Amino acid sequence: MELKKNQEILLTIEDFTREGEGLGKYQGFPLFVKDTVIGDKAKVSITKLKKNYGYARLVEILEPSPDRVTPPCPVARQCGGCKIQQLSYEKQKQFKWNQVANCLKRIGGFEEIEAKMEPVYGMEHPWHYRNKAQYPVGLDKSGNIVAGFYAGRTHTIVPNTDCLIQAEVNKDILEIILEYLRNNHIRPYDEKSHTGLVRHVLTRVGFVTGEIMVCLVLNGKKEQLKNSAALVKQLTVIPGMTSIVINTNKEKTNRILGASCETLWGRDYIEDYIGDVRYQIGPLSFFQVNPRQTKVLYSKALEYADLKGEEIVWDLYCGIGTISLFLAQKARQVYGVEIIKEAIDDARRNAALNQMDNVTFYVGKAEEIVPAQYQHTGIHPDVIVVDPPRKGCDEALLHTMTAMEPSRIVYVSCDPGTLARDCRILCEEGYEIEKVAVVDQFGHSCHVETVVLLSQLKPDDKI
Ligand code: SAH
């Protein structure tokens, strides 16, 4: 078999990768094809060949898979945001559930795990679910000012003011800002020459409160935004507008936000709720981006923690304390640990805002704080909750956790692979998986969130 770059071939898609690419075999040779789904028969064009596999581009669907839908977003293919809009939402949920099951089996060695897995918790309406958006601003080929999202793996802006997974009000906000920039001849930032003023537009929307924040990221200071009163006048017509902020980022960097913010109009922050807990959210705050599904996720964590009111609970990798405060509603005492100091500042402020005095936060590495505290106090917590980044928990921390012998460990994870690896370690040290819940927080992307309940084996369960 001789395949060449740009050669067009017919391919049947047989599998789907974790990144949401279709996989088909041409005379046994595996080819990855973006924008396809299992069951598609398609004409594809070879883009890249490696020794044992290659990549191809979808040219034409010849026979669509029964699972295929027409992506409602007209720029779904170009945009680097959504990866699997072409797959029906029912199948997306199944794909995520299967992915968790496969990882727990293959990496974790949990053979019969399906029996412990709840049906996937998907979104009722998988559109307009994000409360935070960051739109790059730039010029198109004809020199018009545009805002949108980057195409996959590049910094080419795909113009789009009407993203289907963002809050609907963003369209009005962006149209106002683009018109203002045109009318006032304000140049967008150009990465190559490091000139121009406006880099990004960040929006945040409180889904419960309706409060809106608009943050313009400038390669300069607030004063450089000429005639800004006109912009404020237009934006404040939008119902719910609460905060208009300028963020300054003069660095040559891929990071969107700089360190300093100045408020142009209104408050410095917006407020929102997850369940009954109230949070203040500034331009730089980390806050879960799908608040409705976050409530589902945290409620599951709380259910698995099974608190009666007398428990001592650790919440490790706690961020701004969202889970800690959720748990504190039902526990005697919660301890949160997080490595980023600013996040803990937010966590403490939010605890005070909610009049919760049974939460204590520590800044530092979980794998250092927890062993030190355990050694110092000797206290056995009833429940430990962890919600680590994608790389999972530090192994030393897992050993400390099992040495502390909580009755339950609730593992919240954004990466099924490291989740499976860590659960295996916990289960080698006296715990067993009782329940698994998969929650879809990011429809049309390949991200998947999982909550696992592990409980301590009773002495006579142990071998
Ligand atoms: N539980 C939070 C955030 C989880 S994201 C929420 O639901 O909102 C994971 C968090 O772990 C991040 O905030 C990250 O800063 C933090 N982190 C990363 N490494 C860490 C470590 N070694 N010790 C403690 N926190 C860490």
Image (tube, rainbow, N blue to C red):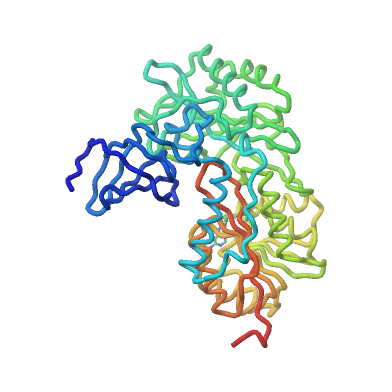
Q: Viewer-proximal residue, 212 or 127?
A: 127
Above or below: residue 43 compared with residue 353: above
Q: Quadrant of residue 12?
A: top left
User: Residue 118 at what x, y percent from top left?
Assistant: 65, 59
Q: Point out the image quarter for the C terminus.
A: bottom right
Q: Viewer-proximal residue, 202 or 462?
A: 462
Q: Quadrant of residue 268?
A: top right
Q: Viewer-proximal residue, 269 or 298?
A: 298
| Relative to 165, 48 lies left or right | left
User: Residue 369 at what x, y percent from top left?
Assistant: 60, 69
Q: How many marks?
A: 0
Quadrant of the picture in which ligand 1 is shown: bottom right
Q: Viewer-proximal residue, 352 or 404?
A: 404
User: Residue 61 at what x, y percent from top left?
Assistant: 39, 34
Q: Please identify the residue farthest to the top as the structure is shown.
A: 183
- Please give the name of the residue rendered at 56% of the width and 55% of the height, measured from the top-left corner: 97
Q: Is residue 199 visible?
A: no
| Relative to 251, 120 lies left or right | right
User: Residue 383 at what x, y percent from top left?
Assistant: 70, 70
